[in-house]
C-alpha cells in the first residue's frame, strides 16, 4: 500500500504536468533481488491503471551509462580500503583514503566531496533544502567493494539522463544532497524533487515487508485506489472505473493538499 501511494503520487504529478510517467526497476543489487518480485510489482501497477508511458527501464541494463559517468568523474574518485569495523562509529566518512588515487584491487570507489559547495534545492513539497558536503554527507561510495554500482550513484546518473521531476518518499530525502551533487559534477540538468510523507502504521513505522505490511490485493484495485487518493488528500469525484478515477484525480492533484503526515494505515485494514 505504501508503494502504491508513492507510485500514484508520482503518476498524478507527471500527468498533471502533461508529462510522461515511466517505470524504472532499480535492480542493480542482484544478491538482494527476489525472483518474481519485479513481475509482481509490474502486475500490481498495471492492475491499478498505472502504465508506463515508455518502455520499462532496468538499472541492471544501464551499466554503460554508469561506466561513462564513472570515467567522467575519475579526477575526483579515490579507492577506499577502510574496513567496516573502522567506519562503524563515523557516520560521515572522514576522508581517510583520499590520497589513494590509483585503482586498488578489492577497494570501494568513493568520490571526494571536500571541495563541493553547499547544495540548495527547492523541494516541491518540503520547500528549501540545503545539504552541506562534509556535514550532511561525506565522500560516498560510487562503486562497491564487490564491484556493484552504488544505488545513490546509479540513481543520480539515471535521473540526470531523462528525468525532469522526481516524486518519492521522505525516506529518500537525505540522499538528495549526494545525488544532486553528483548530477552537478556531471554537468547535467538537475531535476525537480518532491519528497512526500510516507504511509505509516499507527505505531509510526513505515509500511514495508519488514514491518509485515500486508500485500495489496490486485483484485480490489479500485478500492485500493480510492483509499490511496484519500490518504493523499485528493478530493476527486468518484468513478466506476480505475481509468476514470485516475483521470478525475489528475485535475485535483495538488502537492500542497497532501497532509504533513498521512493518516495512518490501520494494521487490521486488510482490504488492501
Ligand atoms: Zn577509506
Image (cartoon, grey):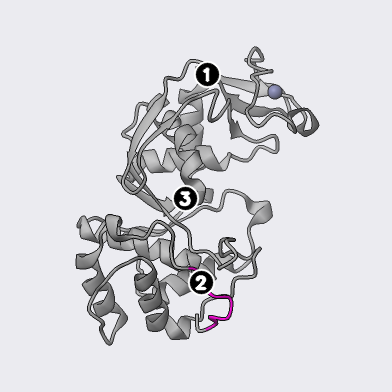
The residue pinned by badge 2 equals 265
Mark nearer the viewer, 3 or 1: 3
Q: Which residues are magenta?
A: 264-270
Is 91 a magenta residue? no
Query: Residue 32's quadrant in the figure?
Result: bottom right
Q: Is residue 151 left or right of residue 145?
A: left
Mark nearer the viewer, 2 or 1: 2
- Say whether residue 142 is visible: yes
The spot of residue 139 in percent (x, y) is 58, 25
- Which structural element holds mark 2? loop
Neighbourhood count class around disc 1 (C-alpha, 10 Å): few under 14, some 14–19, many 20 upward: some
The residue pinned by badge 3 equals 170
- Which structural element holds mark 1? helix
Query: Residue 266's quadrant in the figure?
Result: bottom right
Marked residue nearer the N-terminal end (2 or 1) = 1
The residue pinned by badge 1 equals 76
Q: Is 64 above or below relative to 44? A: above
Labels 3 & 2 near each other (Cβ < 8 A)? no
Q: Which of 124/189 is in front?
A: 124
Is 268 a magenta residue? yes
The spot of residue 224 in percent (x, y) is 42, 78
Amino acid at each position: 500500500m505504501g508503494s502504491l501511494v508513492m507510485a500514484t503520487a508520482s503518476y498524478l504529478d507527471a500527468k498533471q504536468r502533461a508529462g510522461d510517467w515511466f517505470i524504472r526497476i532499480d535492480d542493480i543489487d542482484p544478491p538482494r533481488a527476489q525472483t518474481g518480485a519485479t513481475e509482481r510489482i509490474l502486475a500490481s501497477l498495471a492492475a491499478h491503471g498505472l502504465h508506463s508511458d515508455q518502455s520499462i527501464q532496468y538499472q541492471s541494463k544501464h551499466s554503460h551509462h554508469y561506466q561513462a559517468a564513472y570515467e567522467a568523474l575519475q579526477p575526483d574518485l579515490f579507492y577506499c580500503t577502510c574496513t567496516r569495523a573502522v567506519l562503524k562509529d563515523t557516520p560521515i566518512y572522514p576522508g581517510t583514503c583520499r590520497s589513494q588515487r590509483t585503482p586498488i584491487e578489492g577497494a570501494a570507489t568513493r568520490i571526494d566531496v571536500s571541495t563541493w559547495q553547499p547544495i540548495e534545492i527547492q523541494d516541491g513539497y518540503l520547500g528549501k533544502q540545503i545539504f552541506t558536503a562534509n556535514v550532511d554527507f561525506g565522500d560516498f561510495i560510487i562503486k562497491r567493494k564487490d564491484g556493484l554500482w552504488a544505488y545513490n550513484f546509479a540513481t543520480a546518473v539515471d535521473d540526470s539522463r531523462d528525468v525532469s521531476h522526481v516524486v518519492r518518499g521522505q525516506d529518500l530525502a537525505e540522499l538528495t544532497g549526494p545525488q544532486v551533487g553528483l548530477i552537478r559534477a556531471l554537468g547535467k540538468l538537475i531535476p525537480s524533487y518532491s519528497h512526500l510523507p510516507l504511509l505509516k502504521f499507527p505505531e509510526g513505522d513505515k509500511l514495508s515487508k519488514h514491518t509485515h505490511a500486508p500485500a495489496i490485493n490486485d483484485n480490489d484495485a479500485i478500492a485500493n485506489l480510492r483509499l490511496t487518493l484519500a490518504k493523499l488528500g485528493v478530493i476527486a469525484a468518484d468513478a466506476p472505473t480505475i481509468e476514470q478515477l485516475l483521470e478525475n484525480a489528475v485535475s485535483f492533484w495538488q502537492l500542497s493538499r497532501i497532509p504533513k503526515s498521512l493518516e495512518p494505515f490501520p494494521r487490521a485494514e486488510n482490504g488492501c
